[in-house]
Amino acid sequence: MPDNILHIENLSMQFGGVLAVSSLNLDVCQDEIVALIGPNGAGKTTVFNMVTGVYVPTNGRITFKGKTIAEGYPESQMKKLYAGDHTGEYSKLISNTPDRITALGIARTFQNIRLFKEMTVFDNVLVATHMHLKANIFSTALGLARAEEKRMREETAYLINLMGLSPQKDELASSLPYGKQRHLEILRALATKPHLLLLDEPAAGMNPQETDELSAFIYRAREALKLTVLLIEHQMNLVMDISDRIYVIDFGKLIAQGNPAQVQDNPDVITAYLGVEEA
């Protein structure tokens, strides 16, 4: 696929005897907004956890910008327990810690807001810029760290202004309305300078107005920062509004993919969300 930034190949994750994700194939291209949707318990967050280094795949491979960042195969006791496909196709164990994944250019938000609530908006964002801090004991002794700190503060101010939170920059995170807290969490992820942004249910708990504002916020981030976005979301209005392409999983398996119109009319998707009437 041209301009592919994330490639997920035959990805499986099994916990004991439960196959949470089964042989998933998924691609995200540069500058796209791609949605991963499905009913509760479908395995969506498990996919995010594998991409971001929280879990090592039981089987399969994840490639980011042409480099394998995670790969696994059934070993030890899992050799007997593994219930998925593509056994024997992978022979390497490759993993990265979440901080290393962030440094490579993948940032993530979570279902539950995880702000530093007693810090200001500005300081919440500033903390995230320290991911790229290069100062050490020697540069500090020479006074070079002050220049780097100044640069990070300038970058923080620029990003806050760019994304429209300047009026709230000195407010405590805990004092913000719920929708603005969600914006701040995304903004903090953006401060790590990602190439790929993973959003895990960013509209959870939002009213329709807040959801519309979030859509505009994500669009602005994508356009202004040349971002690629992969999101999990249950708010179908948001998904259909902003997604270029959609993948649908149910019980860990891919059941549909395509543009919003194709997915919306897919009978397998309708069945997964609404069920079928008993005869």
Image (cartoon, helix red, strand yellow):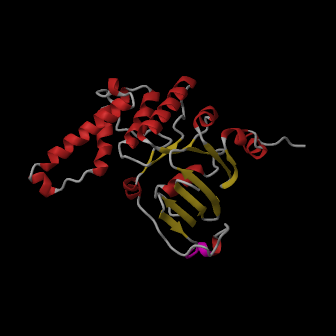
Q: How many marks?
A: 0
Look at 46% across and 37% down and name the residue there.
223
Looking at the rendering, which quadrant does residue 117 occupy?
Answer: top left
Span of residues in magenta: 75-79
Magenta stretch encompasses residue 96:
no
Q: Position of residue 127 (x, y in %)?
A: 29, 43
Q: Position of residue 183 (x, y in %)?
A: 43, 33
| Outermost right residue | 279
Look at 62% across and 76% down and name the residue there.
88
State left or right for residue 231 relative to residue 131.
right
Observer-nearest residue: 51 or 111? Answer: 51
Q: Position of residue 12 (x, y in %)?
A: 61, 62
| Dominant secondary structure (helix, strand or loop) of the stretch shown in magenta | loop
| Outermost left residue | 142
Q: Position of residue 16 (x, y in %)?
A: 60, 65
Q: Measured along the vertical axis of the image, is residue 251 above or below residue 272?
A: below
Look at 64% across and 75% down and name the residue there.
80
Observer-nearest residue: 100 or 181? Answer: 100
| Outermost front residue | 2
State left or right for residue 213 relative to residue 162.
right
Q: Is residue 46 visible?
A: no
State left or right for residue 23 relative to residue 200.
right
Q: Measured along the vertical axis of the image, is residue 57 above or below residue 190?
A: below
Look at 15% across and 44% down and name the residue there.
146
Quarter of the image with the N terminus is bottom right
Q: Is residue 279 visible?
A: yes
Quarter of the image with the C terminus is top right
